[in-house]
Image (cartoon, grey):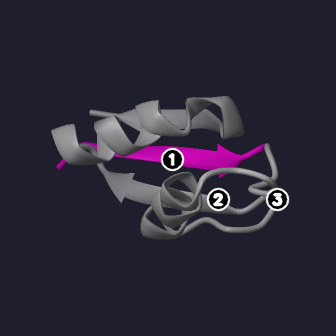
Amino acid sequence: MATVTVRQTGRPLRRNKDQRATLVGLGLNKMGRVSTLEDTPSVRGMIAKVAHMLEVVEAKA
């Protein structure tokens, strides 16, 4: 199964509630946290929504 690993690089301070909730849904909420997730269209959409606060570290097929 394909996975994608993301690292949070931005702070959720002064962001919309839905962006903060998206970070929590991705398993992130503090700077520097890393989360490995299943590579699905819904996860890709969540990553796109908060792309300015994330860095995609690794994507495995």
Mark 3, secondary structure of its residue: loop
Given residues 40 and 59, the one toward you in this image is: 40
Residue type, label 2: Val
Q: CA distance from mark 3 to mark 1?
A: 15 Å
Q: What residue is shown at x 65% (from left), y 59% (from top)?
A: 34
Of marks 2 and 1, which one's residue comes earlier in the chain? 1
Which mark's residue is nearer the viewer, 2 or 3? 3
- The numbered dot on residue 34 is 2
* Category of crowding for the residue at label 3, using alpha-carbon neighbours closer than 10 angstroms: few (below 14), some (14–19), many (at least 20): some
Mark 1, secondary structure of its residue: strand
Quadrant containing the C terminus in the rendered view: top left
Q: Which residue is mark 1?
A: 5
Q: Which residues are magenta?
A: 1-9
Residue 27: x and y in percent read 51, 69
Residue 10: x and y in percent read 79, 44
Q: Which residue is mark 3?
A: 31
Residue 45: x and y in percent read 31, 37
Residue type, label 3: Met
Residue 59: x and y in percent read 42, 34
Answer yes or no: do the residues labelled 2 and 1 have beta carbons within 8 Å? yes
Given residues 1 and 6, the one toward you in this image is: 6
Q: What residue is shown at x 46% (from left), y 58% (from top)?
A: 22
Let me know if residue 4 is in the magenta part. yes
Q: CA distance from mark 2 to mark 3?
A: 9 Å
